[in-house]
Every structure is written in C-alpha cells, then in structure tokens.
Amino acid sequence: MPPAADKNLHEKILNAALRLLRSRGEASLSLRKVAFAAGTTTPTVYKRFRNKQALLLALALRLRDELNDALFKSKSLQEACRVYLRYAEDHPNEYKLLFLLWNEIFGSDRPRPGLDWARKQLARKFGGKPEEYERFTYAIWLICHGGATLLTAPSDLRRRSEHREQTLAICDTLLQSGECLRAPAATPAA
C-alpha cells in the first residue's frame, strides 16, 4: 500500500521557507534547502512549486495577507502607519520579499485590500467618497514605504529611531491636516 499523502505538506513547505527567509534572507532560499527544512524531498517541493519564483510568490502572498490582517486591526490610520513600520522593522527579510515581488502581488490586476481599507478610513474621517482619497492614500503609503525601507537597511539605532520618528511625524501631520490631498472622484468616460 502506498504511503498516505501528507495533507499539510504545502503548509510545511511554506513554513520551512518562511523560517529560512527569516533567518537567512531570500538569497539563501533554494528548493533543496526548503525541502530539507520541511522534511521532504526536492522533487516533492517541485510538484507543488514549479520553481523558486513560484515558491517566493506563494510566500509573499501569505506575508501580504498577514500584514493586511495586522493593519486592518488598527483603530486609526495613525496606528496603521505604526503597525506598518513595526512590521518592516521586526521582519526585514519578509518586508524585502514583499517589495521584491511588488508587481506580482500588488499589480493592477490584483485586489488591493490595504489601499481600499485606507481610502475608506480617510473618507470616514474627512467625509466624501473613498475614491476621492486615492492621492492621499498613496502619499501616506509612499511615506511609510520609504520609512520602512530605511528601517530594513543596516544602520545604527539612533539613525533608525530618527527614520521611524520622522516618518511617523510626517504621516501624523498629513492625517491631522485634513483634506490636503483629497481630489474629486474621477467621472467615468462616456
């Protein structure tokens, strides 16, 4: 009788890849190393992920969902900015992977629940429709991403603290100043 299939093997492989990513970064991942860490064989990993890029994409999608879940628990956009920066600072290799695969996981054909959530938060806070806050949402995200990128780069604690504090101060100022980046919703072309 053939051995029973491990129904959790997909998760075991992703969990092993995540452990390797956290400890050594994306460059250290190979399907062979992931297979060994997951307690399986390289051909078994290839049956589930056609190559390293497919494995990285699956891992990045999981990380995106985890980050979004953390953001959606925020009580305000100010808190969400802090959660975003803390995530990048606490998980630098994961954050770098998210943006290595930016186009694949946040491309124009993919849903963007984080941006949608932020637009709704802005509309609730300042009035109007969520789509009027496209520019405002991007401004906040670009500032947070820039700060997060600096926080994942090697630097001393004083410099990192300065990056974090300045990023949050800018976000707080924008979020307190109201509708400075609000734009009328675009009217559909006839």
Image (tube, grey):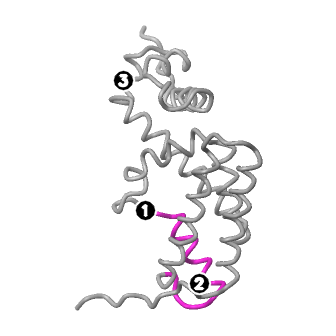
Between the residue at mark 3 and the residue at mark 2, the CA separation in whole angstroms equals: 46 Å
Residue 121 to residue 34: above or below: below
In this picture, residue 111 sits left or right of residue 171:
left
Between the residue at mark 3 and the residue at mark 1, the CA separation in whole angstroms equals: 28 Å
Residue at 40%, 19% (x, y): give it: 44
Dot 2 and dot 1 residues touching (CB under 8 Å): no
Q: Is residue 122 magenta?
A: yes
In this picture, which residue range is highlighted in magenta?
111-130
Magenta region, main secondary structure: helix
Foreground residue among 49 and 156:
156
In this figure, which residue is indicated by the disc labeled 2?
123
Q: Residues within 10 Å of mark 3 (few under 14, many from 20)?
A: some
| N-term mark: 3 or 1 | 3
Residue 189 to residue 95: above or below: below
In this figure, which residue is indicated by the disc labeled 1?
111
Q: Is residue 18 magenta?
A: no
Foreground residue among 153 and 52:
153
Q: Where the C terminus falls, by quadrant? A: bottom left
Q: Amino acid at mark 1?
A: Pro
Q: Amino acid at mark 3?
A: Tyr
Frontmost of labels 3 and 2 is: 2
Circle 3: element type: helix
Q: Position of residue 189 (x, y in %)?
A: 25, 88
In this figure, which residue is indicated by the disc labeled 3?
46
Q: Amino acid at mark 2?
A: Ala
In this picture, residue 21 sits left or right of residue 169:
left
Furthest-top residue in view? Answer: 1
Q: Position of residue 149 (x, y in %)?
A: 57, 51
